[in-house]
Image: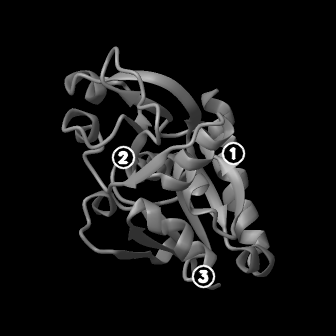
Amino acid sequence: MSYLTIAMPKGRIFHEAVDLLRKSNYQLPPEFDESRKLIIEIEEEQLRFILAKPMDVPTYVEYGVADLGIAGKDVMLEEERDVYELLDLKISPCYLAVAGLPDTKMNEVAPKIATKYPRVASSYFREQGEQVEIIKLNGSIELAPIIGLADRIVDIVSTGRTLKENGLVEYEHIVDITSRLIVNPVSYRMKNERIQELVDRLNDVILEKQ
């Protein structure tokens, strides 16, 4: 039996996904959680995990170096990769929102929006009929309005604490986000039975939690 390769993002999603896999009766050793390796093989389960940056997971799956991946819906919307979405894992819930300094109006002429989601942000404002200039940042998006780089930001909100601590307020809710199980289309055909078994086992656990 050949290995199933799963690309996983590091951080919070990783820990929640590992918990879900264990509850689905996949035997993942305790040291799996603390490993510094970027590729981990679990021989007993014939599973191989690639630990990646969240934005890179759909790329690995699209190009077939991973059969499956776990990616936030935010990443899926931004990356628009050629993969199938198999299952909403209902983990790491959060949402994308427009935020900025309180009681401030957006600039009349080409307001600036800072975000690490340029595709999602430009599409959202286009739907609102607004012409905006998108500034792509890779981190600390909250800084942009404070230092006068942008009128608004588009970013992930989970508790709202980071916005509050930086003196920002939420203006608009764009879309709810959870993590999804995605698959490479060719792997889905070639390894269908094993992938379907994984989906069924995960789905049973998700339904129990509801």
Residue with the most extreme top position:
103
Camera-side residue of 170 and 50: 170
Identify residue for label 3: 63
Marks 2 and 1: which is nearer the front? Answer: 2
Residue drawn at x 59%, y 73% is 61
Q: Amino acid at mark 2?
A: Arg
Identify residue for label 1: 203
Residue 73: % across, % down: 58, 48
Task: Let me know if residue 128 appears in the view.
Answer: yes
Marks 1 and 3: which is nearer the front? Answer: 3
Q: Amino acid at mark 1?
A: Asn
Residue drawn at x 64%, y 26% is 210
Image position of 61 (left or right of 156)? right
Query: Marks 1 and 3, how far apart in space?
Result: 26 Å
Residue 56: % across, % down: 46, 68
Task: Let me know if residue 5 appears in the view.
Answer: no
Query: Marks 2 and 1, how far apart in space?
Result: 20 Å
Q: Residues within 10 Å of mark 2 (few under 14, many from 20)?
A: few
Camera-side residue of 123 and 69: 123
Element on which disc 1 rests:
helix
Say if mark 2 contacts mark 1, CB within 8 Å: no
Identify residue for label 2: 12
Name the N-terminal-most of marks 2 and 1.
Answer: 2
Name the N-terminal-most of marks 2 and 3.
Answer: 2
Image position of 182 (left or right of 40)? right
Q: Residues within 10 Å of mark 1 (few under 14, many from 20)?
A: some
Picture quadrant where residue 49 is located: bottom left
Q: Please determine whether, in this image, residue 108 is positioned above or below residue 12.
A: above
Camera-side residue of 1 and 35: 35
Residue drawn at x 61%, y 82% is 64
Residue with the most extreme front position:
109
Q: Amino acid at mark 3?
A: Tyr
